[in-house]
Amino acid sequence: MAGFDVCVSGSGAVAMSLALALSADGWKVAWARAPESGKPATPDVRTYALNARAIKLLEHLRVWPALQAHAAPVMEMDVRGDEGGALSFSAWQQCVRELAWIVDAAELERLLGEALRFAPRVEVVPPVGEHGAPVEASLLAICEGKHSATRAALGVSFARQEYGHWGVAARLKATQAHHGVARQWFRSPDILALLPFNQPDPIASYGLVWSVPQARAEHLLALSPTEFERELQDAILRSDPSAPAKVGELSLTSPVAAWPLALAQASRWTGPGWVLLGDAAHQVHPLAGQGLNLGLADVDTLVAVLRQARADEPWRAPGDERTLRRYARQREWPTKAMAGLTDGLLHLFADQRAPMKDLRNAGMSLVQRLGPVKSWLIGKALDA
């Protein structure tokens, strides 16, 4: 296959979704990825909270039906502050079937990879190197993640603000059914979330996402499973004395993993013949579970922009800079807004001063009483 329209660089979910979506739209795609390194040394314990827009894209790519077997729906969200503040959302209030789906990260990537094996117009090529793309293509789509070497080679700065916090993740089994309720506690200085999951127990499993200061994360990683479970249970009890009765006892069903958290934004998203997507373009705190949703929304938007340009201005190549700027204009504002929201919430709940504690918890309770504001917030999250 020669004369590629797009070279997609990267090996994660965003890169694979883009290659599949472009292929489905009739573009000739070169998928530049690193060679597979075999089975990972440790299990992937990540879970993703996918919103309605992300699910719609995966349905279009014909990946969702198989992935749904490795997912659990979120029917309600119960969010608690550190001084009595409370906020809840439900699917029926939003007139939707579910607020999100919690999916297995490894299964998502495996199924996307399987779909690409049978995708027409996609050819696997060597990764992008120091001399650029391995093939000639009108557009180089860079989906290499937050440490993208290609982005750096293009001279694009990536302003990165380290939080000094790490995200701690694990899989858990509970003695009480989760009933599709996602629970989150804003606990100064950390944020703890239990996401309903379907493995190993379809009705009583959780994915843990716990944002803690680095020293605390290192301490948690050094604990035995029994010690970790004890500290997690104690943290939940201190956050909300009523929670243990709803959640039950928690036990680990996986290793514990952790990684540093940061806020980052690329100085430019596009240039002549190239475009950034996903974590190569932006990085946000995981407290709202929007990281992958933003990346898949990038994919959805870029493919729609290229499709529209081909219909309206067929003389323009996919790498035309004017076309790519349309993509950047459509995606930069929603991404910056979500980054600002998550960053603001993190700093608000990290403030230990009594007046700020009162203000933030009162604010949560006020939003709880303001139906239109709640609907607007969850609507934004559903669409990313």
Image (cartoon, rainbow, N blue to C red):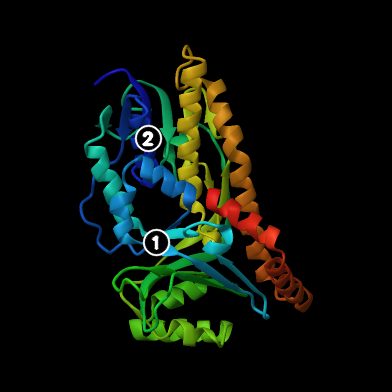
Q: Amino acid at mark 2?
A: Ala
Look at 45% across and 22% down and name the residue there: 318
Whether residue 128 is visible to the viewer of this picture, yes or no, is: yes
- Residue that badge 1 annotates: 47
Nearest to the observer: residue 244 or residue 170: 244
Residue 215 rendering spot, x and y as whole percentages: 51, 73
Residue at 27 percent of width and 19 percent of height: 2
Secondary structure under tag 1 reads strand
Which of discs 2 and 1 lies nearer the camera? The answer is 2
Say few, some or many: other residues with alpha carbon within 10 Å of mark 1 (under 14 / 14 to 19 / 20 or more). many
Give the residue at x 45% y 17%.
Answer: 317
The answer to whether residue 194 is seen in the rendering is no
**How many marks can you see?**
2
Label 2 to label 1: alpha-carbon separation: 23 Å
Give, as a three-letter code, the residue at label 1: Thr
Give the mark nearest the N terminus, 2 or 1: 2
SS for dot 2 = helix
Q: Is residue 215 above or below residue 342?
A: below
Quarter of the figure with the N terminus? top left
Give the camera-side residue of 49 and 126: 49
Left or right: where 19 falls relative to 49: left
- The outermost residue toward the right is 355
